[in-house]
Image: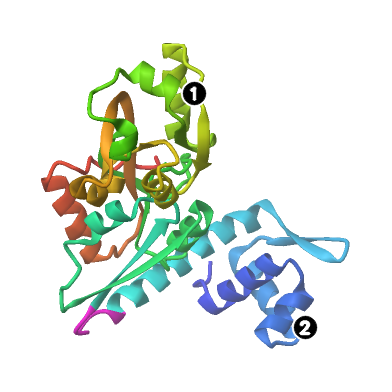
Amino acid sequence: MALLNLHHLRLFRAVATDRTLTGAARRLRLSQSALSTQIRTLEASLGTELFERRGRGLVLTEAGRIALDHAEAIFRTAEDLAATLSETGRGRRALRVGALATLSRNFQMQFLRPLLGRPDVEVVLRSGSQAELLRGLDALALDVVLTNLAPARDAASPWLIHRLAEQPVSLIGTPARVGAGRRPLRELLASEPLVLPTSDTALRAAFDALAARLGVSPAIAAEADDMAMLRLLAREDDGLAVIPPIVVRDELAAGLLVEAARLDGISETFLAVTRVRRFPNPLLADVLRLHSSRGGAKAPVSSG
């Protein structure tokens, strides 16, 4: 077999993405006939057809799907290499961090603190949905994603999941609402309005199970999927919030909020998700190693 031509492979990827020669040729600023010739040349070098025509579009053959998987891996490696080597010799290195928009800001700061203020490091922090962040991680636009939602994995997934911390969860409210004396958990749940995570979160599922075991139907004052909003609602005295104390650490230290009860058996797990890379960002390895030495991070869970 002839040596693989990466230019032909890049054109093939463009056609596979667009699914038409016309659209791909327009994006590539090539004539349709020239693009078709290049694809036929690639097919000849591989010894197999990569597309079959259906109606006005093109569909990948089985060999085409395999070729596309390998092409994506090849170009990701090339982009990874270019991004990594472009940092060499620069005065400042960048760590690109994605954080789930609803994640505790205090936890994010705790993760980033070892790098903040270093003259040789630039931290680029972006927030978004889990799907958006994982797409950025897969495209090598991000080095790590901070989340409390473990991404779905199978044998083909590229994710490495690092458990950074497992935080307890408590009922937290204003001093006026909590009162001076300790009240039993069941009494608090039955008598006070509650500020809860939304029903699609693991934390809410664990809380609902606890309430069911205690035989309590709590009065829900508010629900939010954003830790920052739970924090604000607790400060506004809308009710007792089900929240990890780390989220309201500053308010607890200042006495603006107090812990009414610890919810034993319920915890919030904070994760760092990385991608299998040939040239990982060395800054990330330093931070993960530091968290591991402090006893926070566990060994990464591989995708397969």
- Whether residues under marks 1 and 2 lie with C-beta atoms below 8 angstroms apart, the answer is no
Tag 1: amino acid: Pro
Q: Position of residue 213 (x, y in %)?
A: 43, 12
Q: Which label lies toward us, 1 or 2?
A: 1
* Residue 230 lies in the magenta stretch: no
Q: Is residue 21 above or below residue 91?
A: above
Q: Is residue 46 above or below residue 37?
A: above
- The mark found on residue 33 in the picture is 2
Residue range in magenta is 86-92
- The mark found on residue 24 in the picture is none
Name the residue rendered at 49%, 52% in the picture: 130
Upstream in the sequence, badge 1 or badge 2? 2
Residue 171 can be seen, yes or no: no
Question: How many numbered marks have been drawn onto this rendered protein structure?
Answer: 2
Left or right: 204 in relation to 269? right
Secondary structure mainly formed by the magenta segment: loop
Say which residue label 1 marks.
218
In the foreground, 61 or 82: 82
Q: Please, what secondary structure does the residue beneath circle 1 have?
A: loop
Q: Position of residue 193 (x, y in %)?
A: 46, 31
Q: Which scheme is used to colour this image of the protein?
A: rainbow
Q: Which residue is situated farthest in the left direction here?
A: 293
Q: CA distance from mark 1 to mark 2?
A: 69 Å
In the foreground, 203 or 76: 203
Name the residue rendered at 70%, 87% in the picture: 30
Q: Position of residue 99 (x, y in %)?
A: 39, 57
Q: Is residue 84 above or below residue 229?
A: below
